[in-house]
Each structure stands twice: as structure tokens, then as C-alpha cells.
């Protein structure tokens, strides 16, 4: 999704780094092989970018300037298009079973503004620190996710679960991930990753967890799934 | 970070948390939080419990598997305690480590995505 933009903007001084939040590296690999990135393409099995940069959903972008300063903290990031939402819009609802149609109807309410985000990136690449979208340090900190102790504890539980899952003890990971979900209910990456391992793609309700992607999205309204990007 | 011992060497603590234990305290970018002397164990290692308490890092114990998971700093109350980007080190898909700081001098757009 990002390679085209990288090819276009790398000569202007922008590097893109993609980070896959997947506890299973092989789940992410086919996407990387298809994209053939010429930029660094990394894997973050324990969701360190949640812990260290305040990522709570994907895709999320963070802007870092030439001096290593964050000039925009984690926020929804789309490079001029949102292919997932576009493909959802292309599906004919009448061809789906009722439950899937209901899910799709809700998912189509997800709000993103890929063109506005791309325009912001282009402005930053052209103007650097003079871009109105490159924020001052105080504003960056203020806009980064709140970090109460419960949410930090959730990060520790997520990492504990990932460590156990990676060691082959998936059953032992589940209580840690359940606790991460309870402690940090607004973090989607902890929940989506855990649901996906029980019910790939659909992220439906299973015995392992108390909710599903669709149930939780309906609760907040899909239009609130991504916060608006504040220029 | 995952720990099997609550005393770790400084380099490992810094790599796992982004906080370096120095004579002046626990430091990250421009921030240094003073530490009591017992934070530095006699063998030169870091006493994780003492540093974690000062930085507001929660420690989760998994008794049955014999390890601890250390959560991030909460003293600042925000995910970013400083605008200086953490020096993340993550592997690429061939397992080679990559450090974010190797891109200093360029603008970087870091994008988190997932297969799910």
C-alpha cells in the first residue's frame, strides 16, 4: 500500500518504515512479498509500537523528522486511498448471508480521509518544519495517547501472552490477552490480534474472548472506529 | 520487556525499555529521573523493581511460567514522555535487526499495519 508513495517521495527525503503487528510472522509475509517494499519492512510481534509510540489501531502513522523528533504522534494513516474500505464498498450486499451483510453495512460506515492525509504528507515533505502539519513537541506529547497505569499493565500482559504463544503455549497466552483487553478497552490491536488467532478473518465471538470485532465496533459505531485526523 | 530475573544489565534494560540507567538517574532523551542508590545493584546491574517503581512501570508476574513482563513508563501520563522518537529496534522479515535511529537525517513515516 505504501511502496508507490515511497518511490515517489524517497528522492525528496522521505523514508517509509512499515511495521507489521503480527504475532505470526508468516501471516504478514505474503503481504510483504506482494508489495516488494524497497523501504525497511519490519515485524513487531509484541506490539512494541503500541507501548512506545501509542499505536492503538492499524493502519497508524507516526512522523519523525530529520533530527529524530516525533512531529506527529500515532494517528490513522492512509496513502491517498483506503483499499480495504474500497473493496468493502464494491461487494454486493444482496449476495451475502444476513449476518455478513449486517457486518458489512456497519463496516462501510468507517470514516477515513486518505486524500487529506496524503496532502499533509506532501506538504511536510515539501516544507519540512515550516509545514503546519509538523507539530511542536508540546503538542505532539499532548496528542499522544494517554498512558495510565492500567494501559501500561495491558502492554505487559500483551507481551507476556505473545511470549507464551511464541513458545508454543497458546492456551497460556489467552488469560494474559484477556487481561490486556480488559485493562485497555480502547486498544484495537490487542483485541484484533487475539480474535484473529481464534477465528481468522472474521474475528468473531469464540469461547476464548468475551467479544468480537463486530460486537465491539457496533458498540461504539463504526463511524468512530478511527478518530478523525486533526490537521 | 520479558524478564526471568529482576536484576538485568544496563544495556539490556535500555534496549527493552528505552531508559538508560546512568549516574544521574534513569534517562531517556532530555529527561532524567533521579534514582535511589539501590537502583544500581553492587554487580553493576539494574534493580528492575526499584527503577520500575520510580518510572511507574507496572510489573506483571506469571507465577506458573516463572517470568515477569515489564510495562512502559507511566510517570509522564502520555505514551510519548518526550518528542524524541524511541530508538526502536525491530527485525525485518529475514530476521535482521533494524534500528530506527539509522534513519536520522531523513524524514520518516513509520506505518503500523497488520495482516488481520
Image (cartoon, coloured by chain):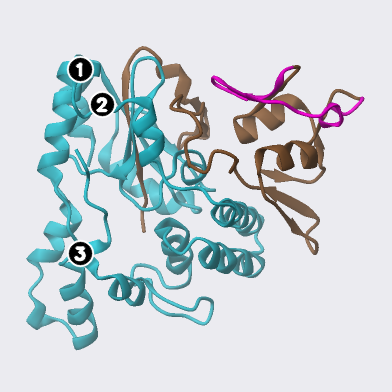
Question: On the image, numbered disc 3 is attached to which residue?
Answer: A223
Q: Is residue A117 left or right of residue A14?
A: left
Tell me if residue B33 is in the magenta stretch.
yes
Nearest the camera: A15 or B57?
B57
Mark positioned earlier in the residue sequence (2 or 3): 2
Tag 1–tag 2 contact (CB < 8 Å): yes
Which residue is pictured at 42% across the width and 56% down the height?
A189
Residue B12: quarter of image: top right
Q: Residue furthest right?
A: B42
Write down the quadrant of residue A201 in the picture: bottom left
Residue B103 belongs to the span the image colors magenta: no
Q: Residue at point 38% right, 76% down? A: A204
Q: Which residues are magenta?
A: B24-42
Which of the two discs, 3 and 1, labels the residue nearer the N terminus? Answer: 1
Indicate left or right for A167 with B109 as reference: right
Badge 1: chain ID: A
Whether residue B75 is situated above or below residue A164 in the rendered picture? above
Q: Quadrant of the N terminus of chain A?
A: top left
Residue under numbered circle 2: A134
**The chain coloured brown in the image:** B
Amino acid at each position: 500500500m505504501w511502496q508507490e508513495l515511497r518511490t515517489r517521495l524517497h528522492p525528496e527525503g522521505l523514508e517509509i518504515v512499515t511495521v507489521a503487528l503480527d504475532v505470526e510472522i508468516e501471516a504478514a509475509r505474503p503481504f510483504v512479498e506482494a508489495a516488494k517494499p524497497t523501504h525497511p519492512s519490519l515485524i513487531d510481534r509484541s506490539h512494541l509500537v503500541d507501548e512506545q509510540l501509542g499505536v492503538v489501531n492499524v493502519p497508524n502513522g507516526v512522523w519523525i523528522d530529520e533530527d529524530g523528533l516525533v512531529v506527529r504522534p500515532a494517528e490513522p494513516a492512509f496513502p491517498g486511498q483506503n483499499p480495504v474500505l474500497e473493496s468493502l464498498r464494491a461487494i454486493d450486499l444482496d449476495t451475502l448471508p444476513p449476518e455478513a451483510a449486517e457486518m458489512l453495512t456497519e463496516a462501510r460506515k468507517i470514516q477515513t480521509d486518505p486524500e487529506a492525509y496524503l496532502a499533509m504528507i506532501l506538504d511536510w515533505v515539501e516544507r519540512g518544519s515550516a509545514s503546519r502539519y509538523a507539530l511542536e513537541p508540546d503538542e505532539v506529547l499532548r496528542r499522544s495517547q494517554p498512558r495510565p497505569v492500567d494501559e501500561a499493565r495491558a502492554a505487559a500482559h500483551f507481551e507476556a501472552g505473545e511470549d507464551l504463544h511464541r513458545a508454543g503455549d497458546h492456551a497460556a497466552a489467552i488469560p494474559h490477552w484477556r487481561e490486556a483487553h480488559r485493562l485497555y478497552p480502547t486498544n484495537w490491536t490487542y483485541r484484533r490480534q487475539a480474535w484473529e488467532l481464534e477465528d481468522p478473518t472474521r474475528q468473531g465471538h469464540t469461547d476464548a474472548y468475551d467479544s468480537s470485532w463486530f460486537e465491539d465496533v457496533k458498540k461504539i459505531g463504526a463511524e468512530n472506529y478511527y478518530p478523525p485526523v486533526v490537521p | 520487556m520479558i524478564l526471568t530475573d529482576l536484576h538485568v544489565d544496563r544495556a539490556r534494560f535500555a534496549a527493552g525499555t528505552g531508559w538508560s540507567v546512568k549516574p544521574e538517574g534513569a534517562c531517556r532523551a532530555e529527561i532524567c529521573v533521579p534514582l535511589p542508590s539501590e537502583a544500581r545493584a553492587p554487580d553493576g546491574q539494574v534493580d528492575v523493581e526499584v527503577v520500575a517503581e520510580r518510572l511507574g512501570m507496572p510489573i506483571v508476574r506469571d507465577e506458573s511460567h516463572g517470568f515477569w513482563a515489564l510495562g512502559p513508563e507511566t510517570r509522564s501520563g502520555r505514551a510519548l514522555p518526550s518528542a524524541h522518537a524511541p530508538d526502536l529496534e525491530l527485525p525485518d522479515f529475514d530476521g535482521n535487526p533494524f534500528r530506527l535511529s539509522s534513519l536520522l537525517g531523513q524524514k520518516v513515516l513509520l506505518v503500523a499495519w497488520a495482516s488481520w
